[in-house]
Image (cartoon, rainbow, N blue to C red):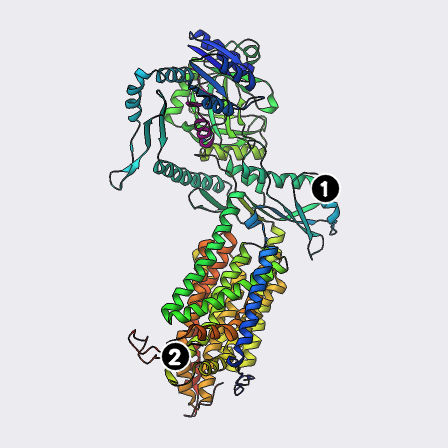
Amino acid sequence: MKILLIEDDTEAAKYLVQALDEAGHVTHHAADGETGMAMAESMDYDVMIIDRMLPRRDGLSIIESLRAQNDNTPVLILSALGEVDDRVAGLRSGGDDYLTKPYAFTELLARIEVLARRANPAEADKALSELKKLITPIGNAILGTSGNNYEVDAGASPGTFIVKPTEQAYRERLTNAVGAAVEVIRRRIDSLGNVEANIVRQGADRVLVQVPGFEDTKALKRLIGQTASLSFHEVHPTISAEEALATRVPYGYVIIREDEANRGSQLIKENEVVSGEDLVDAQPGFDQRTNEPIISFRFNQAGARKFGRFTQSHVGQPFAIVLDNGKDESGKRDIRVLSAPVIREPILGGSGQISGSFTVQTANELAVKIRSGALPTSLTIVEERTVGASLGEDSIEAGEWAAVVGTMAVAFFMLFAYGLFGIFSLIAVFLNLVLIVGVMSTLGSTLTLPGIAGLVLTVGMAVDANVLIYERIREELRNGKTSISAIESGFNRAFTTILDSNLTTLIAGLVMFWLGAGPVRGFAVTLSLGIFATVFTAFTVTRLLVSLWIARQKSRKIPAPL
Amino acid sequence: MFKGVDFWPHNKRLPIMDVRKFFIAGSMIAVLLAIGIIATRGLNFGIDFKGGSLFEVRQTSGKIDVAQIRKTLGELGLGEIQIQALDLPGEALIRVETQKPAEGQNAEKAQQAVEGKVRSALGPDYEFRRTEIVGPAVSGELKEAGVIAVLFAIAGILVYIWFRFEWQFGVAAILALVHDIIITLGVFSLLRLDFGLSEVAALLTLAGYSINDTVVVFDRIRENLRRYKRMALPELMNLSINETLSRTVLTATTTFLAVLALYVFGTEVIKGFSFAMLFGILIGTWSSIFVASPFLLWIGVKRDWSGEGGSATGAAAKAKA
């Protein structure tokens, strides 16, 4: 086959050209976008392999221009950008296949062969029916299926096919990924110990993490957002990374840079001996001799067996422990060799330790990440709100002052306006607050400043119910009713009014809860609880106190209470 | 026994409905003015709706030099930066607009980078007391959710009042409510106050609360409609408003006192919220007394309430204002 490779990493390109050469293909190489475009336009190729990030011209724009010119040469995009979005963008731009770096050469070879075959119309029908075998229903036998995972269609031009995940498949994978992410984040934060975190999924693709009392947001973000997986690789027995760089990288091997402190890179076998999935435990600790921070790990049975076999047959050779941190902020893949010790004797127990210039903190964080497993998807922080401890204290103090002064002001007012009955209503309001705080602590909500605001507002609104009752009693008394019947009709008549006015506020409270980003939700909770407590106490506590007062009266004729 | 001081002049009757045209005219002018102000000046959206970053910082020496901070941060090239000194010694609020992502960079990650840049530019002498970073995706959603929430709350209250009274009452109450909300928004626009999620929460609370007084008045109107079958509607409404006037004012007073304490003692976060509430209580009480009933009269009410709930076939004489 005649292949065009557009790739700016000359080392990688050199290796690839040579390997394709060995596999019997003719490969032309262009090191930047403009040159690649010119070559693609001037010559016919069977397959093109195009990198995405290229100097002078972006890979995707090359593909788009080619497609615009009706050039349907199969294109395999080769890129370090491997997110779903990246791959989708690549395929949308007109690419036929997408392979994420680092990749195995065998896979690349297989894929370009497939691309070439698909371009052959005679094979198209066969390919289509093969592709249709990918389609499987989503869901299970009990709950029924909600659709298929893929849609497969023949594309517009012969030899192209459209395989796209269905909306349901996309949603299901998102749901699963977010659910798994919640679990991973919980395990990671739990492992900090002594931290009470609230982690819930929010909406379709969000996770809300609240960690009260934890100041180090930077560490927290690192802990939440980063993926980390360990794997164990064979190191090339004879060729060093430097030699491989100078000549060529042998087939099946990759160069991975070593941890900063150690400098130098390692030439390791691409397929791992044992993967991170076989790790069951990782704990930070200290080396007994050097007192350096280390991480000790343990394999499961399968991992221990594989590792034991490998170390038995490779005594005297080095092996590499590779840490894949996923992608950093700039989208670059952060993958490095943590250490490359020489195997002195077979390691059969299925456990070991890594020393790799850790600090206590990095050892700790890394152990947590390894233990909690890799995140199913990379997470981006879309909203962050932090309140420093000093401000937190200040604002809670301010909230408490507001609560005390507000309650006092209301108390004085009620006492002034209604005397003894004013005291009754204050007792009711006090019990009201006790109820709210009680329910809140049962629900496990934390008291925040907005929560206190809700409480203060509840005090103001709770006495309203009593004001309505007492004013009604006064009105009935003015109309010449006896004390008892005035009280009776005061409570009865005011009931519907109180219910109506509180229910409207409850509607607002519920809508607010739905609107609910963190602080607003805390307010909505206390406000809504306050409404229930208000209606309850106004008609039980106040009424009880008033009845007790009536019962204590000595003379049969009850004096006007208000 | 101390019975409390009944200081309310219960025997005084205010001829509110007689001069209702002035109140309605005044309120209408206020609403139109508010709409005009909002249309021309817009609302000063906080980062909840606009996106961007906000930092509340404190210079540990207790003295803050806003000009100096502006100069230091201006060199970072973060776009528009607002710096506002707070009442507390050494404290300032720094707002940084939504960052445009660099080529190929995730828009959300661009926002996240701001904090690190600001922190390292200001150095260790500044304590970061509060940090809020809202990415473009979230701010867009919150804006939408805020509008939907207010509309939902209004619709919910309308349905409830309709269900409990009659549709005329519901519509009149909602008109009064919309009046309150628009004027409050107008004040926020006029004073260039930050309008964020907690202010929307205040509007929602206000919606629920300001309807309370209106419900008290409407309840009494309904009661009096049953009692005085022949009384002219304006007179009946005036009687109802006056009978409930002490309630309307006193309930507003207690809540006002409580929220005033929040406003006076509250920190930056709670000030906007309590301001909206304070103003809302005033305007809500005003509208319950002077605006809601004239609206109801204008829409018209069913006179015959003798059959509980009223039958559709009843002689529903509608009085027109």
Residue shown at 35% from the left, 20% from the top: A159
Q: Which mark is residue B72?
A: 1
Q: Magenta segment range?
A: A84-105
User: Tag 2, which chain?
Assistant: A
Q: CA distance from mark 1 to mark 2?
A: 66 Å
Q: At numbered mark 2, what does the secondary structure look like: helix, strand or loop?
A: helix
Number of numbered discs overlaid on the protein picture? 2
Q: Viewer-proximal residue, A287 or A215?
A: A215
Q: Viewer-proximal residue, A449 or B25?
A: B25
Q: Viewer-proximal residue, A200 or B224?
A: B224
* Residue ID for mark 2: A492
Residue shown at 62% from the left, 40% from the top: B114
Check residue A89 for magenta coloring.
yes
Eye-nearest disc, 1 or 2: 1
Under mark 1, the amino acid is Thr
Spot occupied by residue B158 in the image (x, y as percentages of width and height):
41, 65
Residue shown at 56% from the left, 80% from the top: A416
Spot occupied by residue A321 in the image (x, y as percentages of width and height):
50, 22
Q: At numbered mark 1, what does the secondary structure look like: helix, strand or loop?
A: helix
Residue A147 occupies which quadrant of the picture?
Answer: top left
User: Tag 1, which chain?
Assistant: B
Q: Residue lying furthest left in this view?
A: A141
Under mark 2, the amino acid is Asn
Check residue A26 for magenta coloring.
no
Residue B127 in the image: above or below residue A136: below
Spot occupied by residue A491 in the image (x, y as percentages of width and height):
41, 79
Residue A3 in the image: above or below residue B264: above
Spot occupied by residue A557 in the image (x, y as percentages of width and height):
42, 92
